[in-house]
Amino acid sequence: MSTEHESGPVTLIAVLEAPVENADEFVAGWRGHLELLRAAPGFRGARLHRALRADHRFQLVAVADWATAADLAAAAAREQSGPGAQTYAKTVHRGVYRVIGEVASGQQPDGAGVTMVNAFELPNERVEEFLGAWRPRAQRASESPGFVDFRMHQAVGDASLPLVNIAHYASVEAWKALQADPEFQARKAVNPPYATANPGLFEVVAEVL
């Protein structure tokens, strides 16, 4: 796993909790917004994810990568932060994050693959303790057939979702096979009681790289 230096890149993540009103309108607005971001200084790419299941707690997850926190702040000052998420969802979890761990298998899916987003709720002061329990399961996941990559993001400062893991798999079937793996299940079983995981499968509905 690699870690990012404190002065390095940041990621803005916005998670829209169900119910989301006029989701198609929000997606269309985001697609237009991404075109405006292409030329923004320090912009490194963005993706908007939509849950595959209509009953998933988190329906939309917007992720934007920036070279520095200053570049992100400058874009926000120019009102380039995107469609107002609060217009579409009563509860929006938003935060600035840094990548604290990542693994890539070097494999690429034949098609679009699938994105797994797992947003964790836990006390901010127990993040480091939780990561110690999480790393063994992450290691097992990275060894599974069809695994492409993952990035674990930790919020800068207090956040309602202190940790957000974003992983890619070759297919839904590959992800389901991992969930059925006895060793993976055994490592998941040690999940600390103070942490709530919210895993879900998503498709990318808007992207600029």
Image: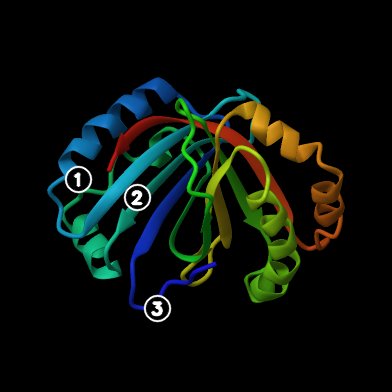
Placement of 81 over or under 34, stated as above or below: below
Placement of 206 over or under 66, stated as above or below: above
x then y, percent, for residue 198: 67, 45
Q: Is mark 2 on a helix, strand or loop?
A: strand
Of callouts 1 and 2, the N-terminal one: 1
Distance (Cα) linking label 1 and label 2: 10 Å
Of callouts 1 and 3, the N-terminal one: 3
Q: Are marks 1 and 2 in contact (CB under 8 Å)?
A: yes
Q: Which mark is residue 37?
A: 1
Residue type, label 1: Leu
| Residue at the image point whose x is 29% and y is 47% from the top | 45
Pick out the residue farthest to the left.
39
x then y, percent, for residue 40: 15, 52
Determine which residue is flagged by label 3.
6
x then y, percent, for residue 205: 39, 28
145 and 193: which is toward the camera? 145
126 and 100: which is toward the camera? 100
67 and 53: which is toward the camera? 67
Residue 161 seen in render:
no
Which image quadrant is residue 96 in?
bottom left
Determine which residue is flagged by label 2.
64
x then y, percent, for residue 126: 69, 73
* Viewport quadrant of the N terminus: bottom right
